[in-house]
Amino acid sequence: MHSRSATFLACVTACTFLAGLRAALAASALQVTLADVRGAPLAGAVVIAEPSAGAPKSPAGQKAVMDQRNLEFVPDVLVVQTGTAVEFPNSDQVRHQVYSFSEAKNFQLGLYAGRAHEPVVFNRAGLVTLGCNIHDSMVGYIYVTDSPWFGRTGADGAVHLQNLPAGDYTVRIWHPLLDESGPQLSSRVHLAEGAAGSVSVKLTRPLRQAVHHNGADKKWADY
Amino acid sequence: MGRLLISACAAGALAASNLALAYEFDLGVDLRGVAIDATQSRLTGGLGKLRFDGDQDGLRLGYVHAGVRADPTETIRVTAEAYAYGDKDVNAIDLTEAYAEWRQLPSSAWRSRVKLGAFYPEISLENRMHGWRSPYTLSFSAINTWIGEEIRTIGAEYSLDWLGRSHGHDFDFSVSAAGYGWNDTAGTVIGTRGWGLHDRQSMLFGRFANNGSPLPQVTIFADDLDKRAGYYVSAATKYRGLVELRALHYDNRGNLAVKATADGDAIWLTYFDSLGARWTPDEAWTFIAQWLHGRTYADEDVPHNAWSFNSEFLLASFKHGPMRYSARYDRFEMQQTYSSFEYIPILLADDGHAWTLSCSRDFNEHWSVALEGILTDSDVPLRALLGQPMGAREQMLQLAVRYEL
């Protein structure tokens, strides 16, 4: 009796392990590599893999933080999945008044310091442009997507997305300084079970000039 | 009545700053070592262009500045700025600005703003620090020196902004209109002393001293003698934070039929146009250009006693780590075009230019130093009245040591 139940347990364990292994093997990976118009790695770009079969439902309780430091939004671009609650702490000594009137989210946080406001839930996909009503030069972005598979390219211009189910995907690319539109920003890719896919994109135009406002100083009155 | 209103504004600003839960406070002290070769300063009754008299070499107080910004509600911000200059002022410490600003929380690309109290119209592109100080040079440009001497909005300003950058566009755009009183004497200083180059702002309750010289003293923001509001309208645009352009038309609508007060404060009808551009191509460089052209009248029988005045400057500034290097060239001119003063045998005029070179270093959040050399040549016929040659070359070297809380 003892021996049979041990065999049964071993069997269950093995089956569970194999099922897990099979699922892991079935999941695909995707590497997206971006280059600017000169062929140099493009860092900081948003990459989103949208499954053609439709995105799975967002898990509840996802949280993210968009900080404000030295009169800039940090990070400059935050990518979140639909339904994520984003907190907007103010780490500056001066007070901020964050707002957006983008289609994907229209909200206002009255003048505050520290963590005075409740997190804001972003429940509609799209690009949300953030501003500060006191410091007009502060601009930040929250990219809200239904897909759970997203990332930003590193210094090598690459982002590695893991655990994607096999299937067809549209890979979308966005960067706040992008000066082009066209098919290169939206590629189709098929991921076979357990296989690793890759997409390489080269921009056709130079990025726009980055703007670092030089008023990042609490002693300055105009921003 | 005017004083009462200003006092109420100031008291309100200070009271709000004490009561509100959240406020920001700055306190700054600026001490100067001064080496100067100049005539008597316009600020002490002479016709010198600079902040100090020719015999004021040595250690001087640049300023003590105290500023407070408080937020009594989530959309209203109250600001008060006060200065002490250590000169023979009516009040040892006095307000230069005291106002409340309401900013609508934007729910679309259009945003309304209202300012109420005593504040600067948005003309200067160099006086961008709290307390209307300049990060570039110790001495302001001729245009902004004059704005600091004679111009303040004591009234209300409405602005409508189009927040293009928060709407996916490259431009922000803004139009403003203001009505104000207590600016009847604006024009007296430029019409009698011409242009200056210094960093002393007129205080809301102070006087422009003459120390017994033949030049008129002025209660800069005198009681509203003619009970007629002045106005200005302006437009501004910003391109991605790289370029900012401003235009403004100002008219104090002085009623010249109203007679001077016993103090000698007279109504001057003054209007001017102002244009400005600031270009910040990268983190290191800033270029600023401003132009101002105006006319002023001081007699009921226009065109008797009419003046025209104009000035322009170019400023280039380079920031490298804690160091900032700035250079500015100012051109300025004032000309009385008609005179009915029989006892002044010459027309009032001023024609000159100035070079300003400045270098500053921040040591930490509190301490900084700035070294500035300024050289100005000017022809002022009225100097003959003070027994001086008409033409003068004035120069000054200032080393400022600054502490900010």
Image (spheres, grey):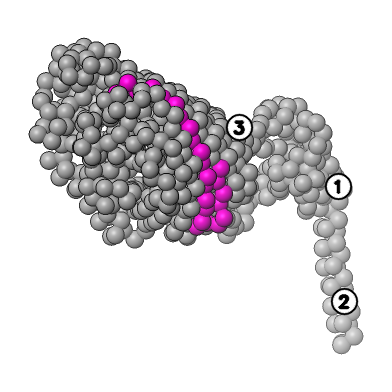
Q: Residue at x 11, y 24 (%)?
A: B258
Q: Which residue is mark 1?
A: A196
Disc 3 + disc 2, Cβ < 8 Å:
no
Distance from disc 1 to disc 3, alpha carbons, whole Å, reads: 43 Å
Q: Please, which residue is most extreme toward the bottom here?
A: A2
Tell me the magenta residue range.
B359-382
- Between tags 1 and 3, which lies in front? 3
Q: Residue at x 32, y 17 (%)?
A: B335
Q: Is residue A211 left or right of residue A9?
A: left
Q: Is residue A133 left or right of residue A151?
A: left
Distance from disc 3 to disc 2, alpha carbons, whole Å, reads: 70 Å
Depicted B39 relative to depicted A96: above or below: above
Is residue B376 on the magenta stretch? yes
Q: Which residue is mark 2?
A: A10
Task: Decide whether the magenta segment is chiefly helix, strand or loop.
Answer: strand
- Asked whether B145 or B215 is in front, the reply is B215
Instruction: Please report, as a chain letter, where disc 3 is located.
Output: B
Is residue A163 on the magenta stretch? no
* Same chain shared by disc 3 and disc 2: no
The amino acid at mark 3 is Pro
Image quadrant of residue A50?
A: top right
Q: Position of residue B271 (x, y in %)?
A: 28, 21
Q: Which mark is residue B281?
A: 3
* Same chain shared by disc 2 and disc 1: yes
The amino acid at mark 1 is Ala
Q: Is residue B167 left or right of residue B338?
A: right
Depicted A3 relative to depicted A95: above or below: below
Q: Residue at x 60, y 38 (%)?
A: B318
